[in-house]
Every structure is written in C-alpha cells, then in structure tokens.
C-alpha cells in the first residue's frame, strides 16, 4: 500500500505530493435572476442569428380533425360490419323451483309471464334493443320489429 505525504498549502486547501487537491476550494458564485435572464436572452438571440440551427425545422401542418373524424368513423363502421352479434328473442320468463324443474319432461307446459299477442323482447349481445311481434314465414318463426328501445326506456 502506497503512503502519501499530504501537505497543507494554505488555509482551506490541502494537497498531496502528486498535486491532487483535497478539501475546500472556493466555489463559483451562483448567478442571480438578472444574470440568468441576460444569459437566456443572449442564447435566444444567438439561435435566431444562426441559420444552421434551423436546418431541418419545418412549419407545423394543421390537420382538419372534423374531416379526419368523419373518415375514421366511416372506416370504423366498415370494419365492424362483419362482426357477429348474438340476437335473442325472448317470448317470456318464469321462475321454477328445483322440484318443478325435475318434473319437467316431453310434453310439459311451462307458463310464461307474457300473454299471447304481447310484444316479445329483442336483445343484441344481452342488451335490450327493441320489441316485436312473432310472425311465421314459410313455416319458420320470425320477429317483426315494432319498437326500438331508447336509453331512457331500457330500465323499464
């Protein structure tokens, strides 16, 4: 291990034989607010004078967001047109006890909470979107939509 001889040069400063300074050295003063403003203004003026700093800088081009939004909405709808949706037409509902459920068999009748001729509920992805009436087309059941449900009617 190398021993190092340290000498005191003057009050507040210590140095070694290899010339390295240790300890307290006088710190530079911190510029005041006026000096900072002056430096900033000087730098800004230098930037304006120097054309090389402005190379590659272009003016901003503003986008017509209303037109862009309409185009994006049209494209979004076009993309969504092939997404499959689950449609359920509900004739009615009922509540059964487990014992009643066990007794059900072929030919059993389950009474529902709606009367014959009452409108049926139409759900898309489990959300009520309308009401309709049951019709028969070529021996198949179908639903004729008679009402579109609005957000205020949904909870009813």
Image: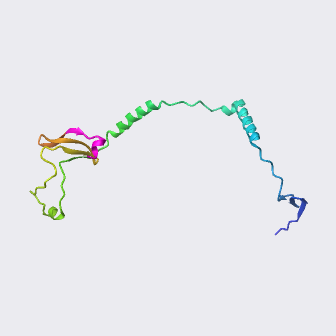
Q: Quadrant of residue 145?
A: top left
User: In the rendered view, does 69 fall on the left or right side of 132?
Assistant: right
Q: Report the front residue among 95 and 57.
A: 95
Q: Quadrant of residue 133?
A: top left
Instruction: Tell me, yes or no, if residue 77 can be seen here.
Output: yes
Residue at the image point whose x is 85% and y is 68% from the top? 3
Residue at the image point whose x is 52% and y is 30% from the top? 62
Residue at the image point whose x is 12% and y is 63% from the top? 103
x%, y% of residue 126?
A: 28, 48
x%, y% of residue 80?
A: 34, 40
Which residue extends farthest bottom?
A: 1
Q: Report the front residue among 137 and 116.
A: 116
Q: Is residue 74 magenta?
A: no
* Quarter of the image that includes the N terminus: bottom right
* Residue range highlighted in magenta: 145-156
Compared to residue 8, the image places residue 66 above or below, namely above
x%, y% of residue 53?
A: 68, 34
Which residue extends farthest left?
A: 107
User: In the rendered view, does 19 fall on the left or right side of 64?
Assistant: right
Residue at the image point whose x is 83% and y is 55% from the top? 25
Instruction: Tell me, yes or no, if residue 18 can be seen here.
Output: no
Compared to residue 152, the image places residue 105 above or below, namely below
x%, y% of residue 123?
A: 25, 46
Q: Is residue 152 magenta?
A: yes
Q: Quadrant of residue 18?
A: bottom right
């Amino acid at each position: 291990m190398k021993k190092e001889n340290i000498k005191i040069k003057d009050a507040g400063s210590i140095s070694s034989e290899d010339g390295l300074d240790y300890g307290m050295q006088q710190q530079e003063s911190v510029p005041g607010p006026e000096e900072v403003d002056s430096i900033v203004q000087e730098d800004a003026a230098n930037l304006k004078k120097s054309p090389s700093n402005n190379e590659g800088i272009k003016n901003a081009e503003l986008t017509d967001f209303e037109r862009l939004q309409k185009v994006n909405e049209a494209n979004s709808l076009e993309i969504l047109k092939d997404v499959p949706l689950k449609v359920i037409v509900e004739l009615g509902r009922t509540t059964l006890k487990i014992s009643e459920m066990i007794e059900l068999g072929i030919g059993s009748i389950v009474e529902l909470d709606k009367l014959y001729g009452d409108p049926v509920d139409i759900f898309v992805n489990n959300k009520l979107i309308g009401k309709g009436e049951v019709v028969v087309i070529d021996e198949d059941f179908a639903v004729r939509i008679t009402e579109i449900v609005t957000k205020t009617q949904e909870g009813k």
